[in-house]
Amino acid sequence: MTSAPAPRFPRGFRFGAATAAYQIEGATGEDGRGVSIWDTFCRTPGATAEGSTGDTACDHYHRYREDVALLRELGADTYRFSIAWPRIVPAGTGAVNPAGLDFYDRLVDELLDAGIEPAPTLYHWDLPQALEDRGGWRVRDTAEAFAEYALVVAERLADRAGRWMTLNEPFCTAFVGHAVGRHAPGTREGNGALAVVHHLLVGHGLAVDALRAAGAREVGIALNPDRLLPATGSAADAEAVARAEILHNRCWFDPVFLGRYPEGEKEVWGDISDFSFRRDGDLALASRPLDFCGVNYYRPITVADAPWREADPARRTADDIRVQETWGDDTARRTTMGWPVVPASFRDLLVDLTRRYPGLPPLVITENGSAEADAPEADGTVHDTDRVEYLRDHLDALAQAVAEGVDVRAYYVWSLLDNFEWAFGYDRRFGIVRVDYDTLRRTPKDSYRWYRDFIAAERAAHAR
């Protein structure tokens, strides 16, 4: 008789799935919700594929019970979702919308009734448009408004929701949204993106304080550190990697976990000396102690040296830091996002983070998954073999990191549902559950069943 496999993850490790409000909720004009920057961006000609919007998305706002039932059948321990700021405080500050709070109250209770831990994220990119009109994340007022909103939400939900995240991927908010313009608000504004970086960090710290004051039990942030690899062995490419590290990783990790700004930042941003938006005490805010650090991971990036792309030194930032980035590794399979599938780089990233930041709190993998060209068979089944292999190999890489001493406490697959994939509209599918966007019917894919069986096997191994 062959022995059953040993568990790959420690006892108490939690498995779940993740989503984001604007990508799944729909109901953008219902029950007092305000307008978000993504509502506005989606109505900008050419901003999203086929002019797609999140107006209906997966209609989770009305179908959340069905989605929680899918989580329960999956065997999920925990569910990471985001809260739509404009649903709670439609104008960003001031009057609170009771119907918005009531929705998340119902969702949290439904999750708890199903035995699933709610894990809310306060900000997954849907800033109230009213705040954007007053300067958005470029100004400190938005960071302070974020803390007020955080307190309102936590006072309602923190008695039942245990794990909280302040921001999701602030890199994307700052640089993809404000420096290269592929995300809302869709601007390319040079030094303005650096003010956004700073005020996101200030807002994070203020929100941590608000969450603690309201009794939140676990507080963290969801970052998306990148595994950056040099294109060649040249010194120039190694220096380009060092510059890219500041852009992608260190401008977040150094303030949050070391309480300092990264050395060499001014060289990276070019001849920009105006950091007047920084105030005494801001680093102490940004580095408030956290219970965990969320890590979103999908693929590595290859970096090469390049000339300055922006002629005006005062506007240099983000894509203008003398680096050229590609997805690299021409031998790897690529997802429909064009991203190479390199599971070993997942392990390498986690090990490297713990070495660089010895005081790093426990990690939570807050997103990991793949967009694949899966389609239903005639009988409605979805055989997403590539996604199954992606999840299997990345969970193997995660288990290797854990075996090497990396303290990881939970894993969230991205995503529970196919959804609105930002500027790509509905053309990219990340879900382990297929959504027919015409009928909104949910169909679990092979990857859903594989992940369900994986979770069950881990539990059974610990039960023996």
Image (cartoon, rainbow, N blue to C red):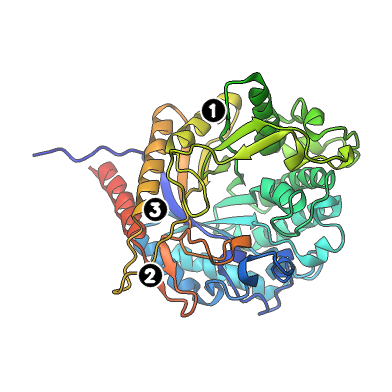
The amino acid type, in three-letter code, at marker 2 is Thr
Q: Position of residue 113 (x, y in %)?
A: 43, 66
The answer to whether residue 422 is left or right of residue 434 is right
Residue toward you, 82 or 26: 26
**Residue indicated by mark 1:** 352
**Residue indicated by mark 3:** 387
Residue toward you, 66 or 371: 371
Residue toward you, 92 or 306: 306
Location of residue 333 by image quarter: top left
Marked residue nearer the N-terminal end (1 or 2): 1
**Circles 3 and 2: CB atoms closer than 8 Å:** no
User: Crowdedness of circle 3 by 10 Å Cα count: few (<14), some, many (20+)?
Assistant: many
Whether residue 114 is visible to the viewer of this picture, yes or no, is no
**Residue indicated by mark 2:** 443
Marked residue nearer the N-terminal end (3 or 1): 1
Q: Quadrant of the N terminus?
A: top left
Q: Position of residue 185 (x, y in %)?
A: 76, 59
Q: Secondary structure at mark 3?
A: helix
The amino acid type, in three-letter code, at marker 1 is Asp
Marked residue nearer the N-terminal end (3 or 2): 3
